[in-house]
Amino acid sequence: MGEWRNLGDLNPKHGAFMVRDARIENGAFHADTIVVIPETDVGGSDRVFDIGMGSLFLARENWASALETSGGRLEGDVILRPGLNGQEDRLEPGTQEYLDELSYATRAYCGPEYESSTLTGIGIPTHYDAASKFPGEVVLYPGGTSLWSIMKSVTDGFDYKVNGQEIESSKPLDLDDGPYAGTPRDINSIADVAKIKGFKDLGLDAQGLPKVWRLEFTIPDDNDAPEVVHSAHEMDTYSHEGEDLIPNKITWIGPKEGDLCEAWDDHYLDTRQPKPSADESIPEMN
């Protein structure tokens, strides 16, 4: 098989359009393709991407109509497209540019025929994300994972090189078992964070907050072992004979996973109101 060509944005997070083995057989255009559609295209989260793999096909009788959708036209077998200074570029059959133009036209005219499609996300959701738009379950990857790497993981035979370097596959987070189990598709508050197994297993306080801190208090005039309290609040106090004591030792006992620690930091004691629905407007701030 041939090499993958990137006909989309240099950054796949803005939308990737990969094409391989573009060719003309029996008068029709054929190619393999991988398309990445960011959820931001429909007003969704900038962490979520639909990665589809399939094929492009365009019968010869549809070339003229397809090229019109992408701004080109046919003159015999030559493709003409707008160029610089009002001139038209002439793309001759048999050239790479000719096949590239047919790739753009086919995608615009009839789209790929997908063999697989995977909804993927990078990092734990936050309340800063736009509400979900793409339906379905998300395969979640650790924060900071390269989208190129995810593309390699969820497609077959994607051997594209970025800046001459081989791409390594990435491993998704396990949302069925372990500390990430129960991670919601959308997170709007600390209560949603508390649903994640890594926090839920710690036990919740009366407010429904995970007890992520171990606090030790020294009792005045008492040589016994310090009083230990598990709390959701780092600077909680302990009442002793009418006096509120502050902890003399504070230890994080919450999840050690970086994405979960960030989820806690992002949402702890957040005072924001729930995100407005699509039918509600956001009030102006004076």
Image: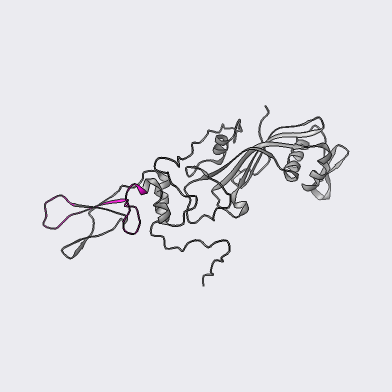
Percent coordinates x, y for residue 31 in the rendering? 72, 34
Q: Classify residue 20 by image quadrant.
A: top right
User: Percent x, y for residue 139?
Assistant: 52, 42
Q: Position of residue 52 (x, y in %)?
A: 62, 40
Camera-nearest residue between 22 and 93: 22
The structure residue drawn at horizontal position 32% and vertical position 48%, both measured from the top left corner, is 202
Residue extending furthest right? 76
The residue closer to the viewer here, 127 or 99, is 127
Determine the residue positioned at 41% across, 45% down: 258
Q: Which residues are magenta?
A: 200-226
- Residue 217, x across and y down, in percent: 20, 54
54 in relation to 265, above or below: above
Query: Is 108 a magenta residue?
Result: no
Residue 72 visible to an observer of this rendering: no
Q: Is the stretch drawn in magenta largely helix, strand or loop? A: loop
Left or right for 269, reference 225: right
> What residue sits 66% from the left and 33% below the top?
4
Which residue corresponds to the image point at 78% horizontal and 48% vertical from the top-left? 69
Q: Is residue 260 visible?
A: yes
The answer to whether 82 is drawn above or below residue 162 in the figure is below
| 216 in the magenta segment | yes
Front in this rendered view, residue 88 or 35: 35
Quadrant for residue 18, please give it.
top right
Count of numbered badges drawn on the protein: 0
Q: Is residue 211 above or below residue 6?
A: below
Q: Is residue 281 left or right of residue 18?
A: left
248 sits left or right of 202 in the view: left
